[in-house]
Amino acid sequence: MKTYLSLAAALFATSALPASAQNLETNLSLAFTDTQFSKNVSPDSTSYRVQAGATYYLTPLDYGHGPYALAAFYGRNLSVSASYSLGEYKPKGDAFDLTAFTLRGNYIHQETGWFADAQYLQTDLDTSFDSKTVQYGGSVGKYFAPTSIVSLGFMRTEDDINGDNSRYTLSNFHAQEIGDDRFFDAGFAVSYLDQEREDDGYLVELASTYYPTKKLGVGLRGAYAHVGEKDEFTYGATSEYFVNENLAFNASYTRLDSKADGFSIASNVFQFGTKVRF
């Protein structure tokens, strides 16, 4: 259903920085997608996307409690972020420019653990008829333990081609130390999908990451969606390694298989990125 290469000189300079409190995180990623359609639906396609973004934390990140990747979660840091991406979508015989812009922000009440977040995403595909997709929404929730949250979320999608849809989500996320500076996290979400142009459906998502050290995380994720007569299975793997508190590299692979009477879609997404904190 409906990311990072940096200049080598800049990366080496950053990796030499001394460890210190950081308020700013920047990221750069590069994603490749290869999609195969059944013959009676659409020609196969490929696409690539380069995304740059930044997150500002109102208080510095603290690395004393858990994995470096989860520093903001453990520290309950308030933040605002923005990203911009550009790329190209290539069905056979054609090529169309693709751009996207995202804004996000969150607030956490430190004493009670209540939190709220909001986001806005706009994607533009430059075809002969110029397609635009707008997504906006947010969630509210609470820390029921120092490293466990439950939230309710809403996301609205307005699409020039596929119509307007809404998603209502209940989710849980938990992180846990299992000894000797080893950690794991796990997340679960179930969503009701309110569709304009087809029957309503549901989405179930699962994800977990194991951290053998505070610097390294390797994870698995999967999802199943049923909408109308369509079944979609998504699964993949992620990894991220922090060289130090300032610099990290990450990679992921995602596979989508979508099937319904008379058609099928299979998609592979490879993403590579880097993250720099100041």
Image (cartoon, grey):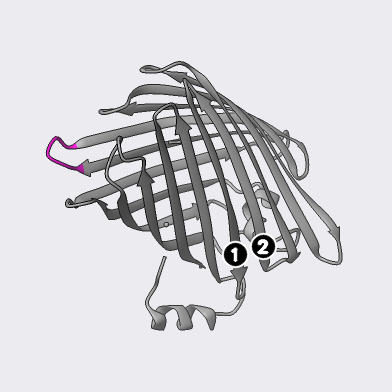
State which tag comes first along the sequence, 2 or 1: 2
Q: Which amino acid does the dot numbered 2 rest on?
A: Gly
**270 left or right, relative to 233:** left
Q: Are marks 2 and 1 in contact (CB under 8 Å)?
A: yes
Q: Position of residue 206 (x, y in %)?
A: 65, 40
Q: Residue at x 47, y 20 (%)?
A: 228
Can you identify the residue that label 1 sits on? 240
Q: Position of residue 215 (x, y in %)?
A: 67, 68
Q: Is residue 129 magenta?
A: yes
Magenta span dominant secondary structure: loop
Q: Residue at x 82, y 56 (%)?
A: 177
Q: Nearer the viewer, residue 261 or 67?
A: 261
Q: Circle 2 — which element?
A: strand
Q: Circle 1 — which element?
A: strand
- Relative to 259, is 210 above or below? below
Q: Position of residue 192 (x, y in %)?
A: 55, 21
Q: Nearer the viewer, residue 192 or 66?
A: 192
Q: Nearer the viewer, residue 256 or 55?
A: 256
Q: Residue at x 33, y 45 (%)?
A: 101
Can you identify the residue that label 2 sits on? 217
- Relative to 273, is 154 above or below? above
- For the magenta stretch, what is the residue range? 126-130
Q: Position of residue 31 (x, y in %)?
A: 40, 59
Asked if residue 60 can be seen in this view, the reply is no
Q: Is residue 258 magenta?
A: no
Residue 187: quadrant of the picture = top right
Q: Nearer the viewer, residue 140 or 240?
A: 240
Q: Total marks drawn? A: 2
